[in-house]
Every structure is written in structure tokens, then in C-alpha cells.
Image: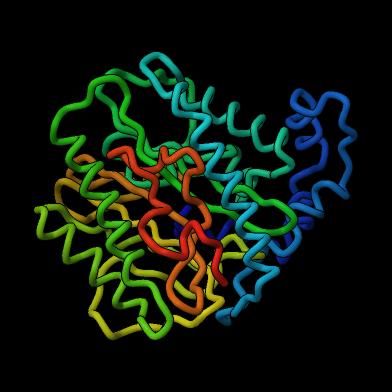
Amino acid sequence: MPPAPPRPASEPTPSGVARILLCGVNFLIYKLKPATTNREFSMTFVESHLAGSGRKSGQIKLHGPEDFEGMRLAGRVTAEALDMLVPHVKPGVTTKELDDLVFDFAIANGAYPAPLDYRGYRKSICTSINHVVCHGIPDDKPLRDGDIVNVDVTFIIDGWHGDASRMFAVGEVPRRAQRLIDVTYESLMRGISVVKPGATTGDIGAAIQRFAEAERCSVVRDFCGHGLGRLFHDEPNILHYGVAGQGVELRPGMFFTIEPMINLGRPQVKILGDGWTAVTRDRSLSAQFEHSLGVTETGVEIFTASPAGLDNPNGASSSGASPDAAAGAE
């Protein structure tokens, strides 16, 4: 999930626990109760999942082997939630129903959905349909045949964040929509392919921009990838455009997301009146894929690769993109 645009009226509080207390524990108890039969809910459960999910630290953290283990678990369960949705994304289903499915899946698997009450956001996932670029809010409107929808899931497990998003085709989609999905996925994988110690964040952006623009698509500039780990959004920012060799040098132990938003039309976006939903100004189709990554000694590990290989629209798991991705190298 890309960082939200500045919203001065609802700044996040210094810790996730404080955020929940300010929001009101009763809301969470009510929300959790239907999915937690035979399981006692307490603030201990909340604290164990939200510890450290507050403000950016301003520094890039380098993580060790135990931290990689925490991210693997959070990333795997996040990917499994997206896998779980595959048979449910179809004409007639509402995005609110998808949101409920993901919430229930999180609780059943010992996770907590990070977007829920993040800066006032009251859903567990983001669902961005057709010309919606990101941060679409689940609602009761049914999906239609031919829609394309991005589902963005972030889970917290034991204080670690797994953040991933994926495109879903609803029924039979137009050829141009499928082409956009394919270009966007390949843009993500081109960005991931250059991640290794000594590379720079500019190398990532340049690889994405070069490919997307060669395919006559545009790269959204208003949102970016981000560091994560104990925090939902941390340093460094990962731009999806740029100049090779520029930016922050990558070092082993860095965790971050790459999540390009690619448009069929122009790159400009606008934020709707709800303060969250970003749409293309020209109403062209937009697509996004996202993975959470760790820089290893020799390359990159994809924490949110689908265990079932369902994250690739062409049918092969993204874990094959890097020797480290499936091997769990530190």
C-alpha cells in the first residue's frame, strides 16, 4: 500500500496501540467478535500485532536473519490472503465482501490488517477498480464483467508488515486491459530484477520507467514504494521512475516495497473528496502490482511471493525471478 497523501487533520499517532486506544477499543471488539469464536480478544493481541506501526523513523534500517524470518511469515500470510481471493473476484461480488473475507482470513491466521483505522481508514484492504490508481475504498457496488481491480493487502504478524497488491480480471476483460495488467506486472519484475547490494533506488525506478514507457504506458509519479518492517511506511521511498545510478545505495538488510502504478493514458492523478481514492485525471485505466522485498548479500528475497504461484498473471510464480526469492537467503 503506497503512503497516503498528507492529511493534516488525522496524523497517525506515535504507536499503533495508541492509535487503537484513540479510535476506541469497542469498535475493534465489535469488528473482531464475529471472526474470533472461541478466542479471547484482548489488548495483548492488538499490541503483539501492532507494535512499532507508528511514524517513520527518518533512518534506513538494516535487518538481520531473525528479522528476515519475521518478514517471511508476514509476507507469506499476506500472499495467501490474495491467493484466497482468486475464486471470489467475479461479477456480482462487492468489494466490501472481499474486505470481509480478508479481515476474517487475517484473524483466523493470527494476523491484523494494517490499513484498518490507519489514519482514519475504516477498511481492511484497498480495492482500486479500472481508472482508480490506488487507495480505493471497498463498498457495496458489485463488480462487473470486464472490470480490472487491484486488491492491496497489508498484514501485521508479530509486529512485522507484509504488504502486497495484485491485479484481478473480473470475468472477460478487454484486450487493452489485459495488456495493461501484463505490462504492469512485468514493470514490477523489471524493478525487482535490479535489486542487489550496490545498486541504487534510481536503478529500480529507471528499469520500471524504461519498460513501461517503451510499452506506450505511463508511470504514476504521485505515489511510491516505501521501506517497511516494524513500521508500515518507513525509509527509503522507492520511486518508480528515475535515473540509473542515482538515489539511495541498496545494502543487505534493507526492507522495502516496489509497487508501480502504470496508466494506459497520462500519468496525472487526482484525489477524490473522500481524501483517499486516487484516480487518473483522464479516466484511463490504471494497474498496480506490489511485493515486499529484502536485500540479501547476493540479491533480493521476495517476501510476498504467492506459495501457489498465483501472483503472476501469466501463471508462473514471481519467486522464480531471483535465486534468493524462494531460497530464503539472508
Which of the 4 quarters of the picture holds residue 34? top right
Which of the 4 quarters of the picture holds residue 243? bottom left
Q: Residue at x 36, y 64 (%)?
A: 192
The residue lying toward the viewer, choosing from 278 and 34, is: 34
How far across and how far down the image is residue 3, in percent?
48, 59
Q: Residue at x 72, y 58 (%)?
A: 159
Q: Is residue 204 above or below residue 126?
A: below
How far across and how far down the image is residue 74, in percent?
63, 52
Q: Is residue 91 above or below residue 149?
A: above
Q: In the rendered view, does 259 fall on the left or right side of 242?
A: right
How far across and how far down the image is residue 176, in percent?
14, 36
Which of the 4 quarters of the picture holds residue 224? bottom left
Q: Is residue 323 above or below residue 261?
A: below
Q: Is residue 3 visible?
A: no
Q: Residue at x 57, y 45 (%)?
A: 78
Q: Is residue 207 visible?
A: yes
Is the C terminus in the top left, top right, bottom left or bottom right quadrant? bottom right
Q: Is residue 133 above or below residue 85?
A: below
How far across and how far down the image is residue 22, in percent?
77, 51
**How does the figure colour the protein chain or chains?**
rainbow
Q: Residue at x 81, y 34 (%)?
A: 29
Q: In the rendered view, does 14 fall on the left or right side of 187?
A: right
Q: Residue furthest top?
A: 92
Q: In the rendered view, does 160 fall on the left or right side of 239?
A: right
